[in-house]
Amino acid sequence: MNALHSPEFEQLRVNDLHAFYGESHILHGIDLQVRRGELVTLLGRNGSGRSTTLRAIMNMVGRRTGSIVVNGTETIGLPAHLIPRLGVGFCPEERGIFASLNVEENLLLPPTVRSDGMSLDEIYEMFPNLYERRFSQGTRLSGGEQQMLAMARILRTGANLLLLDEITEGLAPVIVQKLAEVLIKLKHKGLTIVLVEQNFRFAAPLADRHYLMEHGQIVEQISAAELDAKQELLHRCLGV
């Protein structure tokens, strides 16, 4: 088996990551690893540094130091536009779809960075709502449909490491459940997912491991099997 496709292959390894916006020092020595096929969450209150961690991986911060290895390649010195070519897809909280284009045009825009990107038919099978709205402009989509479209665009590129930032924010429970089903399907396809999520009840049953963040640092790593034993810590840090 090719090492890249081994279940033990680390698709993401972050060591001693510091990130800055101007003079503000946001991340203070982040260490984390994500193996192929895992779904790992970054948990914490607002301002803990979760979203900045994703942006730092994509080199979308003012300055970063440390080591970030993506699919076996050190990226700390790479410009931001080259990082997606390593197979990383980033879905920011603001979604970033093209409002003036319809759904299908949005799906046809992304460049293919790896050969196993999903076809339009596969996308529409996974997101039936998008098929029904394929000729609707981005401005006419609901929040849930916009979120589905933002995720679908990444899947079109062939990215095998997905960085998802607050994908359930402000969405109706029925849409949140649909997104959970999509994440389960993506895991079964072997994709690797790092999920920043405020909705712990959404994230808990999906994830293999959780990294708990406070003040720009990781304070605890919790496996799915340890969740019950760590309830007091989770309540203190998350209020759940």
Image: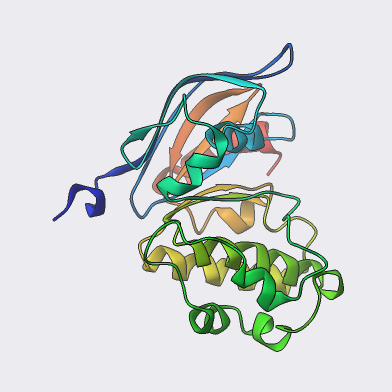
Scheme of colours in the image? rainbow
**Marker count (numbered):** 0
- Residue 37 drawn at (x, y percent): 36, 55
Q: Nearer the viewer, residue 232 or 132?
A: 132
- Residue 205 drawn at (x, y percent): 51, 58
**Image vertical order of residue 114 relative to residue 173, above or below:** above
**Image vertical order of residue 190 relative to residue 166, above or below:** below
- Residue 3 drawn at (x, y percent): 19, 47
Q: Quadrant of the C terminus?
A: top right
**Image vertical order of residue 101 relative to residue 78, above or below:** below
Q: Residue pushed farthest right? A: 140
Q: Residue pushed farthest bottom? A: 132
Q: Residue pushed farthest top? A: 23
Residue depicted at x 45% and y 71%: 185
Confirm whether residue 232 shows in the render: no
Q: Quadrant of the N terminus?
A: bottom left
Residue depicted at x 53% and y 34%: 57
- Residue 16 drawn at (x, y percent): 46, 18
Q: Nearer the viewer, residue 78 or 211?
A: 78
**Image vertical order of residue 40 relative to residue 170, above or below:** above
Decide if residue 138 is on the left or right side of residue 183.
right
Decide if residue 193 is on the left or right side of residue 42.
left
Confirm whether residue 204 shows in the render: yes
Residue depicted at x 66% and y 31%: 236
Q: Nearer the viewer, residue 58 or 127?
A: 58
Q: Nearer the viewer, residue 112 or 92?
A: 112
Q: For residue 170, what is the image quadrant?
A: bottom right
